[in-house]
């Protein structure tokens, strides 16, 4: 649906541009059209609408083309030059590095690597706020629930296999299914470090598909 909407916006803008440039020399008009088409190609609906707004009214583009002749043939490079001065955090390359740091930075620098990745993800505008929250919080939620479930199951299993006498002598903490055992902690740590963290980074990379590089 987003791709269809982006295509519709692109075609409508190009149609208005063609109508505005009817009296512009053919070569100049074609160069302008190709440059703008390259700018809009591959963007999603939101990015297409934003880029069209920045390109401006087709009538103004056509007027500048008539005034400048061949020198006005490529408004797209002007846009690119303006964007190159924008902060690095708004680029697609920065977002890719952020996602990889979040998913795998902890393997290079334990704990600190993940924190760096989380900060970089927070700085990138190419993800929505909800996507960032899911990537940062979901691994902790899943590990907590996993540890709780394993603790409950192990507690129920041990309580069923002990005798009444042994159960009477056991301490409350030993029979408390909510107290995690060493195995619970090892299992949760393995799940967190080797499965959930890389998965969160890869999920953010997947969400980048179709997002415009700023």
Image (cartoon, rainbow, N blue to C red):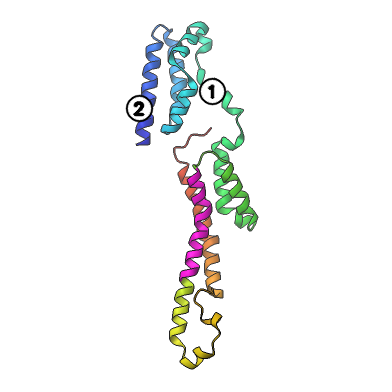
The answer to whether residue 59 shows anywhere in this view is: yes
Considering the whole magenta stretch, tell me its main secondary structure: helix
x%, y% of residue 192? 53, 61
Residue with the mark numbered 1: 79
Residue with the mark numbered 2: 8
Q: Earlier in the sequence, mark 1 or mark 2?
A: 2
The residue depicted at 60 percent of the width and 56 percent of the height is 106
The answer to whether residue 43 shows anywhere in this view is: no
For this view, does 16 lie left or right of residue 191? Answer: left
Between 47 and 164, the one lying in front of the other is 164
Binning the other alpha carbons within 10 Å of mark 2 as few (below 14), some (14 to 19) or many (20 upward) gives: some
Answer whether residue 196 is magenta in the image: no
Q: Compared to 11, does 139 lie above or below?
A: below
Q: CA distance from mark 1 to mark 2?
A: 22 Å
Q: Compared to 37, does 159 lie above or below?
A: below
Binning the other alpha carbons within 10 Å of mark 1 as few (below 14), some (14 to 19) or many (20 upward) gives: some
- Magenta residues span 129-149
Residue most extreme to the bottom: 165
């Amino acid at each position: 649906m987003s791709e269809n909407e982006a295509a519709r916006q692109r075609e409508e803008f190009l149609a208005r541009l063609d109508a505005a440039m009817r009296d512009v020399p053919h070569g100049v008009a074609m160069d302008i059209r190709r440059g703008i088409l390259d700018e809009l190609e591959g963007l999603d609906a939101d990015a297409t609408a934003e880029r069209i707004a920045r390109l401006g009214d087709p009538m103004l583009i056509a007027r500048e083309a008539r005034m400048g002749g061949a020198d006005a043939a490529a408004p797209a490079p002007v846009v690119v030059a303006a964007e190159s001065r924008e902060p690095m955090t708004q680029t697609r390359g920065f977002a890719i590095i952020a996602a990889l740091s979040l998913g795998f930075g902890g393997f290079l620098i334990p704990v600190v690597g993940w924190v760096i990745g989380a900060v970089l993800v927070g700085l990138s505008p190419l993800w929505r706020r909800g996507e960032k929250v899911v990537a940062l919080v979901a691994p902790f939620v899943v590990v907590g629930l996993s540890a709780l479930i394993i603790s409950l199951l192990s507690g129920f299993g041990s309580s069923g296999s002990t005798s009444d006498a042994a159960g009477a002598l056991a301490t409350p903490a030993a029979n408390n299914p909510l107290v995690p055992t060493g195995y619970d902690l090892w299992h949760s740590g393995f799940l967190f470090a080797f499965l959930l963290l890389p998965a969160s980074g890869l999920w953010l990379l997947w969400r980048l598909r179709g997002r415009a590089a700023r």
